[in-house]
């Protein structure tokens, strides 16, 4: 498309309003962290883990694992369910997590 036909102001407005762009940026920023990626890997292969199980497996404190899970939940990557006194986490099913699952593979 020739530069003379591009409506820069309109494109800037579209970018500013795009929830998809903001959502994608939040997700990539969140999962770019190695600990977060390890959590995603665990939940991909071992769904339904508690915070303490995740902390133990990833080598984080429970507090650090909880902060990581909160960020992943905010980014719409994980979901939580409460079973009695325990909160358990799973990967959400959406286009992004499907892509992530493919990237994490079966190994």
Image: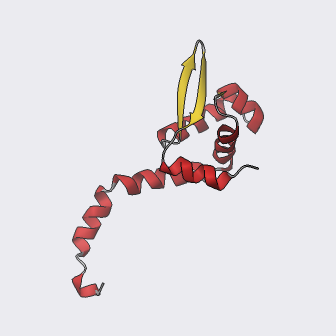
Q: Which residue is drawn at 59% across and 49% down?
A: 31
Question: Is residue 29 something one can see in this rendering?
Answer: no
Locate residue 56: give its quadrant: top right
Q: Along the line of sight, which residue is nearer the eye, 98 or 21?
A: 98
- Give coordinates of residue 2: x percent, y percent: 29, 87
**Foreground of the two, 64 or 22:** 22
Residue 8 as seen in the image, left or right of residue 75 = left
**Residue 103 appearing in the image:** yes
Q: Which colour scheme is used?
A: secondary structure
Vertical comparison of 6 with 84: above or below: below
* Residue 45 in the image, given as x and y percentages of width and height: 70, 40
Horizontal and vertical percent position of residue 18: 32, 56
Q: Looking at the rendering, which quadrant does residue 87 occupy?
A: top right
Total marks in image = 0
Q: Residue furthest top?
A: 84
Give the residue displayed 52% in from the left and 39% down from the top: 92
Quadrant of the image containing the N terminus? bottom left
Residue 1 drawn above or below residue 65: below
Residue 51, above or below 98: above
Q: Quadrant of residue 90?
A: top right
**What residue lies at 73% left-to-right and 36% top-to-bottom?**
60
Q: Position of residue 32 (x, y in %)?
A: 60, 53
Nearest the camera: 8 or 105? 105
């Amino acid at each position: 498309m020739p530069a003379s036909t591009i409506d820069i102001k309109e494109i800037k407005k579209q970018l500013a309003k795009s929830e998809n762009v903001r959502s994608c940026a939040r997700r990539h920023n969140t999962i770019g962290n190695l600990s977060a990626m390890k959590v995603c890997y665990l939940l991909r292969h071992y769904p339904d883990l508690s915070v303490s199980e995740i902390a133990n497996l990833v080598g984080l404190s429970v507090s650090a694992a909880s902060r990581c899970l909160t960020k992943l939940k905010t980014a719409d990557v994980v979901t939580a369910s409460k079973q009695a006194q325990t909160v358990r986490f799973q990967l959400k099913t959406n286009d992004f997590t499907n892509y992530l699952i493919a990237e994490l593979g079966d190994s």
